[in-house]
Image (spheres, rainbow, N blue to C red):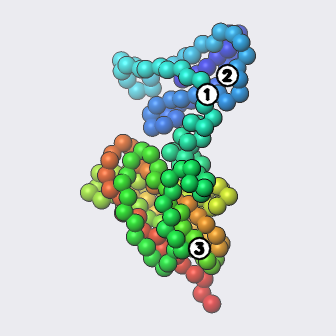
Amino acid sequence: VTLYDQTGSYVSENDDFDGLNSQLDIAAPLAAGTYCIAMRALSDPAEPITISLTEYDPVAALMGQYDRAEAAPPLDGSYPVTSLGTLPGRMRQDSTLSETAQWYSFDVTEAGLVLVEAIATGGNGDPSLYMFDDLGRRVGYNDDNGEGYDSLLSARVLPGTYLVAVKDVGSSQSMVRMVFERYLPAK
């Protein structure tokens, strides 16, 4: 989908915003006038397409970024994040895998390396992993580690709080087993 202004000048475009769906979020107010939305299907042009136009909602846009693991949510309780506490040497966490990210936080007390693995149980999921520090910087990402669809990410960490999101790349509703491992440098 591409947006043009009344002079035919390009304003914005998007492909595959969420899965294969396109979406334009125009945060700055547009000047008064007439606009044109151009669109085409990249796969089957005979498939029906639904277009909707809504007023930009910055809160909904931010929540959508959390749902897609594009940004780390705050740890103030305004968005669901499951606290795992201080990360021991190894921890297992089962979760439901969906297109909406499931968020977990954990604390690290010493500098080292953290490995997080997401294994789809039943073999019908495609998990992806995202890791952020407490300031919201993405410090790790992985999808499709090795020859399968399971994910494995590693990140060097300093003492502090970290957030991990797991979500399904597709649209399956399956279980995922996550394994968190912490390694310390040799002394």
In the picture as drawn, the residue positioned furthest to the right comes out as 31
Q: Under tag 3, what secondary structure?
A: strand
* Front disc: 3 or 2: 3
Q: Quadrant of residue 94?
A: bottom left
Give residue 140's position: percent from left, percent from top: 57, 59
Of the residues shown, which amino acid type is indicated by label 3? Val
- Residue 45 or 117: which is nearer the viewer? 117
Give residue 102's position: percent from left, percent from top: 46, 53
Instruction: Identify the disc placed on residue 56.
Output: 1
Above or below residue 79? Residue 32 is above
Instruction: Identify the disc placed on residue 11.
Output: 2
The residue to which callout 3 is attached is: 108
Of the residues shown, which amino acid type is indicated by label 2? Val
Q: Quadrant of residue 133?
A: bottom right
User: Disc 1 versus disc 2: distance between alpha carbons?
Assistant: 16 Å
**In this rendering, does residue 46 appear at all?**
yes
